Image (cartoon, rainbow, N blue to C red):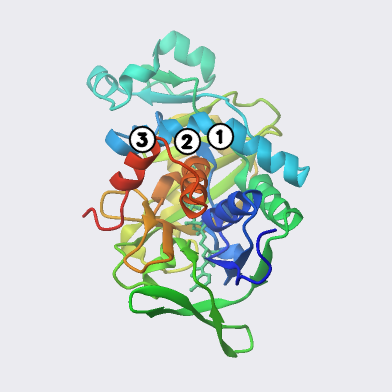
């Protein structure tokens, strides 16, 4: 459990990245304390859980980082499942991207990684797909994790099993530094009491809210609204990823429908008729008969976005304060590689050349 005389490393934010990094560090023997304002607002509980570097059409460094994380997912999941004794609902179910015309199909950024499907093959994969979709790419290597019902809880349990300490309902209100060295944080508890927590090291994982406590970070929220419908088991075999809309079938027939992408909404909470209509019309455009299935839940959350939509990873301008934020649409996919890169860096575990180059590509001051 690390040196008991040393103050624990602080994890600022107990969402997906906070939990994934706390878990990694605890496995490496580090003493860790997670400061979490509200677990329920975390995007980790909102996401659709797609592992989709290819279906999302990622490009450049972000595609490479996503592909590496996808490779490391099975081992990462295994460690969480072993430590928590819970399933994470990981499935390499494949993702279909349908197209209305040849040009969009051939110019899709990840075209070379997909199996090419004509309309007849597409229909075999996705019965009921509406007529306008005439071509498709099947990315068999992409998949999903049931983040909302399983992964987040499994991560919490794994952390607790490994001795991670949690303070829930605690807001970090100020980062304290001394000559550019991290010195601790000021926190406010649910009763409004303010305290100082001293530490030499912390990881900032406040997701979409990161800029509120570290003003120079180029992070802003992108709101997403979702809903779920309940079908019979196996109603959809694979994820269907259309433009602006996707359908993610869980094992038990639940289908997650996502998502709006609302940059102008800021931190405005709640569902809107426009957002919910977008989802209903999206189902109609892909597989109209799914609109007959009963709706189960509707929810929303905030993606942490940066100007180039890539994460901010590694040491910040304050020595001892690490960054793991800004994962935008791909935090579930990138949690495996993020926690490993940050965990290894903090514990001075040697990094490969490839890992070092990712840390340099995703530095906070690259813009
Ligand atoms: C609608 C939607 C769909 C998505 N779908 C996918 C998908 O299919 N695949 C994928 O890979 N990714 C997806 N994502 C993205 C993914 O959910 C995020 O990238 C990821 O959750 C970010 O993790 P995080 O830990 O940085 O932020 P979060 O999970 O949001 O956690 C941040 C935490 O920090 C806490 N916090 C904030 N400020 C403070 C403070 N001052 N003090 C203490 N705590 C604080 C918050 O309470 C919160 O719990 C989706 C996101 C959304 C919103």
Label 1 with label 2: CB-CB less than 8 Å:
yes
Q: Can you identify the residue that label 1 sits on? A: 73
Label 3 with label 1: CB-CB less than 8 Å:
no
Which of labels 3 and 1 is toward the front? 3
Residue 112's mark?
Answer: none
Residue sitting at 27 percent across and 34 percent down? 60
Residue 137 placement (x, y as % from top left): 39, 19
Q: Is residue 305 above or below residue 252?
A: below
- Residue nearest the observer in this picture, 361 or 328: 361
The tag earlier along the polypeptide, 2 or 3, is 2
The Cα atoms of the two marked residues, 1 and 2, are separated by: 6 Å
Residue 89 makes an appearance in the image: no
- Identify the element where label 3 is drawn: helix
Residue 189 makes an appearance in the image: yes
Q: Quadrant of the N terminus?
A: bottom right
Q: Is residue 271 above or below residue 75?
A: below
- Identify the element where label 1 is drawn: helix
Residue 86 placement (x, y as % from top left): 76, 43
Instruction: Count residues near mark 2 (Cα–Cα under 10 Å), then give few for <14, some for 14-19, many for 20+.
Output: many
Residue 69's mark?
Answer: 2
Residue sitting at 33 percent across and 62 percent down? 219
Residue sitting at 32 percent across and 20 percent down? 111
Q: Can you identify the residue that label 3 sits on? A: 353
The Cα atoms of the two marked residues, 2 and 3, are separated by: 16 Å
Quarter location, residue 316: bottom left
- Residue nearest the observer in this picture, 185 or 335: 185
The tag earlier along the polypeptide, 3 or 1, is 1
The Cα atoms of the two marked residues, 3 and 1, are separated by: 20 Å
Residue sitting at 68 percent across and 33 percent down? 253
- Residue nearest the observer in this picture, 241 or 358: 358
Residue 105 placement (x, y as % from top left): 29, 21
Instruction: Count residues near mark 1 (Cα–Cα under 10 Å), then give few for <14, some for 14-19, many for 20+.
Output: many
């Amino acid at each position: 459990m690390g040196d008991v005389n040393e103050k624990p490393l602080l994890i600022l934010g107990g969402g997906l990245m906070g939990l994934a990094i706390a878990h990694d560090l605890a496995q490496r023997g580090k003493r860790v304390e997670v400061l979490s304002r509200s677990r329920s607002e975390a995007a980790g509980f909102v996401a659709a859980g797609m592992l989709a570097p290819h279906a999302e059409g990622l490009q450049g460094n972000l595609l490479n980082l996503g592909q590496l994380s996808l490779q490391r997912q099975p081992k990462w999941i295994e460690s969480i499942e072993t430590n928590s004794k819970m399933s994470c609902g990981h499935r390499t179910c494949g993702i279909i991207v349908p197209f209305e015309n040849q040009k969009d199909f051939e110019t899709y950024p990840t075209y070379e990684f997909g199996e090419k499907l004509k309309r007849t093959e597409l229909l075999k994969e996705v019965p009921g797909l509406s007529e306008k979709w005439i071509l498709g790419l099947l990315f068999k290597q992409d998949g999903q994790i049931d983040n909302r019902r399983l992964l987040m809880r499994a991560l919490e349990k794994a952390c607790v099993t490994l001795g991670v300490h949690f303070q829930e309902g605690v807001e970090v209100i100020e980062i304290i530094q001394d000559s550019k060295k991290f010195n601790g944080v000021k926190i406010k508890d649910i009763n409004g009491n303010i305290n100082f927590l001293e530490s030499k090291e912390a990881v900032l994982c406040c997701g979409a809210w990161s800029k509120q406590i570290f003003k120079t970070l180029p992070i802003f929220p992108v709101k997403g609204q979702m809903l779920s419908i309940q079908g019979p088991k196996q109603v959809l075999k694979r994820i269907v990823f259309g433009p602006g809309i996707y359908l993610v079938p869980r094992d038990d027939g639940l289908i997650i429908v996502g998502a709006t992408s609302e940059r102008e909404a800021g931190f405005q909470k709640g569902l809107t008729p426009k957002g919910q209509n977008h989802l209903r019309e999206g189902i109609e455009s892909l597989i109209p008969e799914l609109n007959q299935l009963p709706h189960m839940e509707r929810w929303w959350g905030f993606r942490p976005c940066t100007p180039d939509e890539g994460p901010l990873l590694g040491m910040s301008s304050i020595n001892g304060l690490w960054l793991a934020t800004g994962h935008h649409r791909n935090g579930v996919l990138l949690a495996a590689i993020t926690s490993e890169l940050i965990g290894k860096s903090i514990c001075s575990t040697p990094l490969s050349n490839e890992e070092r180059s990712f840390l340099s590509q995703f530095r906070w001051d690259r813009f």
